[in-house]
Image (cartoon, rainbow, N blue to C red):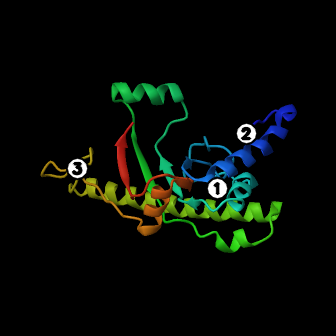
Amino acid sequence: IFRERPRAPLNLTSLDELTWLLDRGGTFTGIHPEGARGTGPDPYELLPAQSGVGRILHGTGAVVLPVFVNGLCNDIVRQVRSNFDGTGDPIHIVFGEPVDLSELRARPGSPRTYKLIAEHCLEAIRALGAEERAHRAGRAAAVALGQLGADGVDGRGRQAQQMHQIGVGAEAAVAHGNAVLGAQHGGHQEVRA
């Protein structure tokens, strides 16, 4: 998305191209419903939804999988370096159930409809953020009680991991290759950055 005024007309062309690619199938796309990645100190404070993602989703039948990611830093060089030197913090990723947009997609296309679609997707992501926060609080309590070490390994040397399968809808999205806002299924996953 171009922020400079002279190039802004290209944004609609980009949205239309992405809509066409998703409707054709075989394409996975990650999109921030806010139009940009939040860089503030609170990962649970999301920016306001923008209508661009709603315009894309209204014009396609793509399956929407909401994803909440916590733990990425705002310095890309440091983030990449941490992959190699092991200094990165854990990254927490929560994948949600497919978002039902059938009622909103049935409405006539308009800026208001596009905004409602984007807000609906953002609410699904916000709910995943609350789930991730609760999961992390539970892990912190387990560490405090001595049930888990600070590294997430239990007393028997096993990595603690809680997984939730999404179900048939997510499997179909992956099999047909037309998903937006996420391209995998699963639940709480911890990886080292």
Label 2 crowd bin: few (<14), some (14–19), many (20+), radius 10 Å: some
Q: Amino acid at mark 2?
A: Ile
| Disc 3 from disc 2: Cα separation | 40 Å
Q: Nearer the viewer, mark 3 or mark 2?
A: 2
Query: Residue at horizontal 35%, vertical 43%?
Result: 191
Q: Earlier in the sequence, mark 2 or mark 1?
A: 2
Tell me the element at label 3: loop
Q: Amino acid at mark 3?
A: Gln
Query: Residue at horizontal 54%, vertical 30%?
Result: 75
* Vertical relation: 82 (above or below) 35: above
Q: Give the side of residue 165 with respect to residue 113, left or right.
A: left
Find residue 188 and name its label. Answer: none
Label 3 crowd bin: few (<14), some (14–19), many (20+), radius 10 Å: some
Find residue 1 and name its label. Answer: 2
Q: Give the side of residue 17 with respect to residue 41, left or right.
A: right
Identify the image quadrant of residue 13.
Answer: top right
Query: Residue at horizontal 14%, vertical 52%?
Result: 155
Q: Nearer the viewer, mark 2 or mark 1?
A: 1
Q: Nearer the viewer, residue 79 or 120?
A: 120
Find residue 159 and name its label. Answer: 3
| Disc 2 from disc 1: Cα separation | 20 Å
Q: Amino acid at mark 1?
A: Asp
The picture places residue 47, in percent across and down from the top left corner, at 67, 51
Q: Earlier in the sequence, mark 3 or mark 2?
A: 2
Identify the image quadrant of residue 53.
Answer: bottom right
The picture places residue 118, in percent across and down from the top left corner, at 69, 59
Which residue was labeled with disc 1?
23
Tell me the element at label 1: helix
Q: Nearer the viewer, residue 35 or 19?
A: 19
Q: Residue furthest bottom?
A: 103
Identify the image quadrant of residue 89.
Answer: top left
> Considering the image in quadrants, where does the N terminus appear?
top right
